[in-house]
Amino acid sequence: MAADDNERPFPDPPTATMNDVPKALPQDPSRHDHALGGVCRLPFWGVMQASGADAASFLHGQLSNDVNRLDARQARLAGYCNAQGRMLASLIVARRDADTIWLLCAADLLPATLKRLSMFVLRAKAKLSDVSGGLVVVGLAGEAAQTHLGRALGHAPAAEAWSRHDLDSGLVVRLPDAGLPRWLWVGPADAAAALEGALPALSTTTWERLDIRAGVAPVQAATSGLFVPQMLNYELVGGVDFKKGCYPGQEIVARSQYLGKLKRRAFLLAGATQPKPGQEIYWSEDPEQPAGQVAASAPVGADGDAALALAELKIGAVGTGTLHLGSAQGPTLTLLALPYAVPQLAGDATPTA
C-alpha cells in the first residue's frame, strides 16, 4: 500500500471516554517504590545499530513510530510488527549521530529481530549490526539520579518522556514513570562504571517493577507475536504514530484504532503469585476461555510474597467478577490504577473477543 507521511486512510476515531474502572482500588503493594532511587545495569536489554544514509528511512518503513523526524532531542518507543499487526519486538529508537541510530531491544529477541530486519534492507544504504558487546544499558531512577544528570549535563534534564540528551560518551533517555523519574543510559562500559560509582545501587528486580508500575511492557521472547500495539497501550505511551504511513501490520493497527475495534487493553494487576510472561488470565464471568495474557511481571517485597504484572485483558473483564491466574480456579489477581488514563470506546463498555 502506497502512502505518504500525511496520508489519513481512515476517519477520525470514534468519541472516547476515559476509563476509570475499577472505581475503588486496593492498596498497591509497590506503593513505597516512589522512595527508591539509584542505578543498575540492565542485562536484559541489547543494542542494535543502524548506520548509513538510508538508516532512518529504512527503519521508518519498518516500525510503528516516526523515525524520519527523529532528532537529537528525542527518542521513540516503537513496535516491530508482523503482517497481522502483532509485535515481534519493541524498540527504543534514538539517533547517535546524523547517520547512526541505536535501537534498544530485549536481549532474548535481538538476534531474531536483527535477522528479520536485515532481510528487508535490500538496496537501502543501511547496515544493521549487534553492538551490545561494546555498549551497556543502565537504568537510573529517583531524585539523586536527577541531580547527578543535571550536574553532568549542566542543566536539568528534560522532563518529557522520551526526551534524549548526550551524556558521557553515550546518551540518556527519559522514560515514562509513575511518579519516580527514570532514565535509560546507553554507552561504553567504562563510562557506565563511573555512573554506577556516583549513585546507590538499585536491583534489576526493582527496575522491572518500576517498568510495570509505569504501565510500559517491552516485548520479550515469551510475548513475541502475541499483542497488537494497542493491547499493551503503546499508543498511550508514545509508541505509535498513526500519521506516518506504511509499515508491516499498519493496516491492522490503524483499523483497530479508527474503526472502534479495540476490545483489549493492558491493565496493572497485583497478586500473591508471580505470573510468567505469556501466562493466561481467566475471568470468573466467562471461565471457559482465557480473558487475557501476562505481558510482564515482577515480585514485590524482600520475600517475594506479592507480585505486580502488566497484562492484556478484554476490556469487558475489568468491571465485574474476578480475575484468576492460569485457570478459572487459579490465584486471584486484583486490578490496580495505571499512571495514565486508558480510553474505553463509548458505547462499548463490555466488548467481547
Image (cartoon, helix red, strand yellow):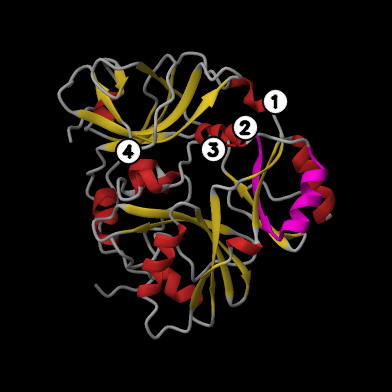
Query: What residue is shown with label 2?
Result: 179
Looking at the rendered image, the disc whose residue lies closer to the viewer, 2 or 4, is: 2
In the picture as drawn, the residue positioned furthest to the left comes out as 288
The vertical placement of 265 against 187, above or below, is: above
Residue 189 is a magenta residue = yes
Residue 195 in the image: state x and y as whole percent. Answer: 78, 49
User: Could you tell me if the residues under marks 1 and 2 are in contact, i.e. CB atoms within 8 Å?
Assistant: no
* Residues at discs 2 and 4 in contact (Cβ within 8 Å): no
Q: Amino acid at mark 4?
A: Ala
What mark, if any, has residue 211 been given in the picture?
Answer: 3
Q: Mark yes or no: residue 313 visible.
A: no
Disc 4 + disc 3, Cβ < 8 Å: no
Residue 60 vs residue 324, the one in the foreground: 324
Secondary structure, mark 2, is loop
Measure how far apart labels 2 and 4 are at the Cα level: 26 Å
| First in sequence: mark 2 vs mark 3 | 2
Magenta stretch: includes residue 240: no
Q: Earlier in the sequence, mark 2 or mark 4?
A: 4
- Between discs 1 and 2, the one toward the N terminus: 1
Q: Amino acid at mark 1?
A: Ala
Q: Position of residue 313 (x, y in %)?
A: 30, 32
Mark 2 residue type? Gly
The secondary structure type at the circle numbered 1 is helix
For marks 1 and 4 on the same chain, the one whose residue lies earlier in the sequence = 4
Question: Which residue, given by chain and number where applicable, does mark 4 sit on?
Answer: 16
- Which residues make up the magenta segment? 178-199
Instruction: Give coordinates of residue 84: x percent, y percent.
Output: 23, 56
How far apart are the alpha carbons under marks 4 and 3?
A: 26 Å
Front residue of this view, candidates 223 and 143:
223
Q: CA distance from mark 2 to mark 3?
A: 12 Å
Q: Nearer the viewer, mark 1 or mark 4?
A: 1
